[in-house]
Amino acid sequence: MFSPQIQSYIDSSSQAQAFKRVSEINNYINSIYPVQNSNKTQQASAFEEILAESKKEDKSGIFDLDLPPNIKKTAPVSFGSLTKVTAKKPIYNSKEAILGYVKEASEKYGVEEKLIKALIKQESGFNPNAVSSAGAKGLMQLMPATAKHLGVKDVFNPKENIEGGVKYLRQMLDKYNGNKILALAAYNAGPGAVDKYDGIPPYRETQNYVKSILKDYL
């Protein structure tokens, strides 16, 4: 049963509609931010934001009521007309999430997962925020110009970085007819250097790079 204060808000049809709409908003927020001590503030903020937006769009006047704060604690109802509101998905940097992005990129570009993981281990040690002295960034150490060419907007976004890096590795594999050694050398030193020397360039860094990745891969 509702308290006399809340019941008074439900007596008219317009007030009942407002009550239902607020319930819908509240339950929608609950579905995004489960009630836990760590996110109560975020939950409340999201509730107020969506409620304010609903008031702006409303033409019936049903939100012109001074609803009491405890009206938020209503029983669950089906979510209806708030489908235009979407929650921004967070960027996940956990090892589990990163391996999931590796799997997705592997399937999309036809590059073995274990080869991608070996390359990431060598490039960044699975650190999404890694930055080299040369300016390469992220898990697969993409240079700014290369990232831009590959369509990567945020090199520190694990999903975007892996997508771009695997796409580039696929291009190198295609260029060298599936030869993993030459593709890896080109990933490190650039295809121009591989073409110039018709093989792995005589750079100690590149030679150790290829050996290290192949060791993990094999």
Image (cartoon, rainbow, N blue to C red):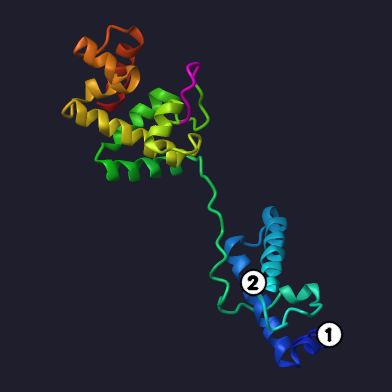
Compared with residue 3, is residue 45 higher up or lower down, i.e. above or below? Answer: above
Q: Is residue 14 visible?
A: yes
Marks 1 and 2, the one that precedes in the sequence: 1
Q: Residues within 10 Å of mark 1 (few under 14, many from 20)?
A: few
Q: Is residue 26 left or right of residue 64?
A: left
Q: Which percent across, then down, holds residue 168? A: 32, 32
Q: Which percent across, then down, holds residue 129? A: 53, 30
Labelled disc at residue 5: 1
Q: Is residue 206 left or right of residue 143?
A: left
Magenta run includes residue 203: no
Q: Nearer the viewer, residue 130 or 40?
A: 130
Q: Quadrant of residue 169?
A: top left
| Residue where numbered disc 2 is placed | 25
Q: Which percent across, then down, holds residue 206? A: 32, 13
Residue at image coords 83%, 85%: 5
Query: Which quadrant holds the C terminus?
Result: top left
Please state which amino acid type lies under the numbered disc 1.
Gln
Residue at image coords 38%, 33%: 149
Residue at image coords 81%, 76%: 68
